[in-house]
């Protein structure tokens, strides 16, 4: 088990190795960040975008939450953490791509599919239940297509539908619509399978296919 003391040990290794190796990079980064890509991923400890995409500090603007969800554009009150991050990425950093990264064995998707915390009180799953209500439409679609909601196929379909839901919701933000229409922004989806480590990328036909190496 890794605890905070282990994390500080890790920091010491980072400070004496990577920090020094990447000195020039950090010198530039202290002035500001200019990531070209925003990634929206799950909080799941197994799905670390910087590791999966092998990136360096400053390359991705990342927001993580339960089930890699983006809420729809809303003008009402509330603490819209994800919306604030999307707004900052698109209108201030002017990222050219947003990647919604789903993953296999997603507990949030599983809870949404099974209705695990339905009607639970705050502190007993109520916050999770409210949050994954964003997947009600996805759940309905998966329910229609898969009779047995406890099957692996249903779970995988839900994980893919969650990515599509976030993409659809991103497109409800006026500034995202504008950036996409003007060609400044592209939105992409992918799912990382934990069991075999394969990244499947959403294509234009709406299906997820294993990522291919870039053509030379
Ligand atoms: Zn997850």
Image: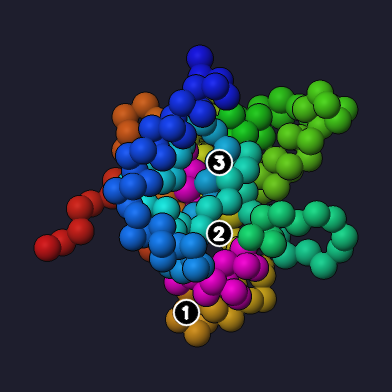
Check disc 1 and report the residue beneath it.
184
Q: How far is mark 3 from mark 2, CA to CA?
A: 14 Å
The quadrant the C terminus occupies is: bottom left
Q: Is mark 3 within 8 Å of ligand 1?
A: yes
Earlier sequence position, callout 1 versus callout 2: 2
Earlier sequence position, callout 1 versus callout 3: 3
Magenta range is 86-105
The residue depicted at 20 percent of the width and 59 percent of the height is: 214
Give the SS element for disc 3.
strand
**Residue 210 location (% of width, % of height):** 29, 46
Q: How far is mark 1 from mark 3, CA to CA?
A: 25 Å
**Which numbered circle lies on residue 42?**
3
Check disc 2 and report the residue beneath it.
167
Q: Residue furthest left?
A: 216
The residue depicted at 57 percent of the width and 24 percent of the height is: 4
The residue depicted at 62 percent of the width and 48 percent of the height is: 69
Disc 1 packing (10 Å; few <14; some 14–19; many ≥20) = some
Disc 3 packing (10 Å; few <14; some 14–19; many ≥20) = many
Closer to the camera: disc 1 or disc 2?
1
Earlier sequence position, callout 3 versus callout 2: 3
In the rendered image, is residue 199 in sight? no
Give the SS element for disc 2.
helix
**Residue 62 location (% of width, % of height):** 53, 53
Q: Residue furthest bottom?
A: 182
**In this rendering, would 96 be left or right of 178?**
left
In the rendered image, is residue 20 in sight? yes
């Amino acid at each position: 088990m890794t605890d905070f003391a282990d994390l500080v040990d890790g920091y010491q290794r980072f400070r004496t190795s990577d920090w020094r190796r990447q000195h020039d990079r950090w010198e530039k980064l202290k002035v500001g960040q200019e990531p070209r890509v925003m990634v929206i991923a799950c909080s799941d400890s197994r799905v670390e975008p910087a590791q999966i995409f092998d990136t360096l500090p400053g390359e991705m603007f990342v927001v993580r939450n339960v089930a890699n969800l983006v809420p729809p554009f809303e003008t009402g009150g509330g603490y819209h953490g994800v919306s604030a991050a999307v707004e900052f990425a698109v209108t201030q950093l002017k990222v050219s791509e947003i990647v919604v990264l789903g993953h296999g064995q997603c507990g949030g998707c599983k809870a949404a599919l099974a209705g695990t915390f339905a009607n639970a009180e705050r502190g007993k799953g109520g916050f999770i239940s409210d949050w994954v209500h964003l997947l009600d439409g996805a759940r309905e679609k998966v329910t229609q297509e898969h009779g047995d909601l406890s099957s692996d196929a249903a779970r995988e379909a839900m994980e893919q539908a969650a990515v599509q839901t976030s993409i659809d919701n991103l497109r409800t933000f006026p500034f995202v619509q504008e950036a996409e229409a003007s060609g400044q922004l592209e939105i992409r989806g992918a799912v990382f399978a934990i069991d075999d480590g394969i990244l499947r990328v959403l294509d234009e036909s709406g299906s997820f296919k294993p990522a291919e190496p870039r053509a030379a």
